[in-house]
């Protein structure tokens, strides 16, 4: 079971955890990204996320399929926010259920690492004195 | 042929628009489009990197374009 | 900040996640143990957890302190159940917040792995035709 | 001296009680206690392993016991 969602509304972490619960599961690993109040010692006011929605969803589906191919998993959930997020809000939740915890941990880590490399979503950091698209420039 | 190019993030700001149209000869490749865009928008070539997607799939420079393809400029992603 | 709890009541996963949220956090990793419906192809009816409470808490505190010494962490939470748990219930939740996700993932994994080696908590698996203390016998 | 030993999990079942008392000479070590318990309860020695904790700390065989110590038999743990 894979559940993927790109949403302008707050991500419901409790829903995400419950969605991957299963009688066959022994371990669930959940990664929750949160908006930090600073980056490289500079105060962050908010983040703005933009997505190429159709492709972002298909890339997230590819990552989930590849995780299922690599590890014996039961359920994978990926929810990603779009729009303006304040400090402390949650841009991303990844939840992975497996019979054994090794697979859950490794797959969850793989999914967030790969998402950050391949999924067409962009974030702009907004500071008091300007803003910058993360990773855009060398 | 006319190719519509959609752009996101910093590329959208460089183009000054989320969609631009550009004229390309028939059977032009992604590589040709990249050269053309970098000439027209030099700041594109100054990015850390960027990819082109054709119909929602990352496309290498050799991929040939067709008039109705959905072509997108993908600057370095930073989700999560 | 470390929060450790041994409890006969259901663990509130939402509370656990919220407890480690922090404006300085960029990533939270949460491990949720769940009671599997089988072990080695045998149907499990329920688990019974017993703890040497005082020592279990001091061993969990040692693990958290050692995780803080190994990784740059912001908050660590460990909640562990005692008593009778049905299939699908949650024996353990570990939540780790850090500025960067590498530390959160590694510390969370370390904490559950070490907990399973050193914390004096025991589980008995109850089957249709008997019961067994897990890991007790060679 | 009399030493009170508390036991958990399978050890509690082997002892038939969560607490037993045993007589040891003064300054007896954890190792001595282990030998004595294994003689009295042979199934203890058949476990995959077990530890002894003194005052809530794992204690190696050389540790010397005192009359008021809280001594616990810790069969293989299986939390999580």
Image (tube, coloured by chain):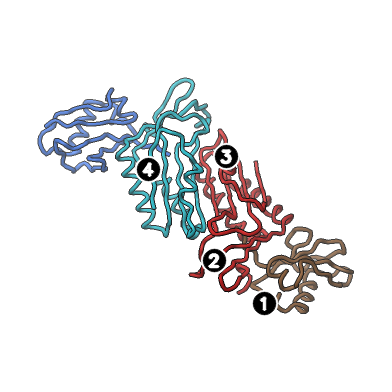
Chain colours: A cyan, B blue, C red, D brown
Residue indicated by mark 4: A117
Q: Are marks 3 and 1 on the same chain?
A: no
Which quarter of the figure is the C terminus of chain B placed in? top left
Foreground disc of the pair 1, 2: 2
Q: Are marks 2 and 3 on the same chain?
A: yes
Give the distance between the C-alpha atoms of the residues marked 2 and 3, in whole angstroms: 32 Å
Is C29 situated left or right of D56 in this image?
left
Q: Quadrant of residue B63?
A: top left
Q: Residue at the location (77% across, 71% down)?
A: D31
Disc 1 crowd rating (10 Å Cα; few below 14, some 14-19, many 20+) is few
Q: Is residue A82 left or right of residue D58?
A: left
At label 2, counting other C-alpha atoms closer than 10 Å, the crowd grade (few under 14, some 14-19, many 20 or more) is some
Report, in whole angstroms, how far the alpha carbon at label 3 lies from the one at label 1: 45 Å
> Spatial distance from mark 4 to mark 2, Cα to Cα?
41 Å
Horizontal and vertical percent position of residue B37: 22, 30
**Exactly how many numbered labels are in the figure?**
4
Residue at label 2?
Answer: C44
Please name which of the two marks, 3 or 1, marks the residue nearer to the observer. Answer: 3
Name the side, left or right, on which A64 lies relative to C71.
Answer: left
**Pointer 4 and pointer 2: residues touching (CB < 8 Å)?**
no
What numbered label is drawn on residue D46?
A: 1
Q: Nearer the viewer, mark 4 or mark 2?
A: 2
C123 to the left or right of C40: right
Q: Chain of mark 4?
A: A
Residue A85 drawn at (x, y percent): 46, 30
């Amino acid at each position: 079971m894979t559940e993927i969602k790109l949403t302008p509304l707050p991500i419901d972490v409790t829903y995400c955890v419950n969605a991957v619960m299963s009688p066959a599961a022994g371990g669930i690993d959940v990664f929750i990204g949160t908006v930090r109040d600073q980056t490289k010692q500079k105060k962050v006011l908010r983040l703005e996320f933009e997505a190429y929605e159709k492709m972002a969803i298909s890339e997230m589906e590819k990552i989930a399929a590849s995780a299922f191919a690599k590890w014996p998993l039961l359920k994978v959930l990926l929810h990603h926010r779009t729009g303006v997020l304040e400090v402390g809000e949650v841009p991303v939740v990844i939840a992975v259920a497996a019979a054994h915890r090794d697979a859950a941990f490794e797959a969850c880590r793989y999914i967030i690492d790969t998402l950050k490399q391949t999924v067409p979503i962009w974030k702009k950091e907004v500071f008091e004195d300007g803003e910058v698209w993360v990773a855009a420039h060398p | 042929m006319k190719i519509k190019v959609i752009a996101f993030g910093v590329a959208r700001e460089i183009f000054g628009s989320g969609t631009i149209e550009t004229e390309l000869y028939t059977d032009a490749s992604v590589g040709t489009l990249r050269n053309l865009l970098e000439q027209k928008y030099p700041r594109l070539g100054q990015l850390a990197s960027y990819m082109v997607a054709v119909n929602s799939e990352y496309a290498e420079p050799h991929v040939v374009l067709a008039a109705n393809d959905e072509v997108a400029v993908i600057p370095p992603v930073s989700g999560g």
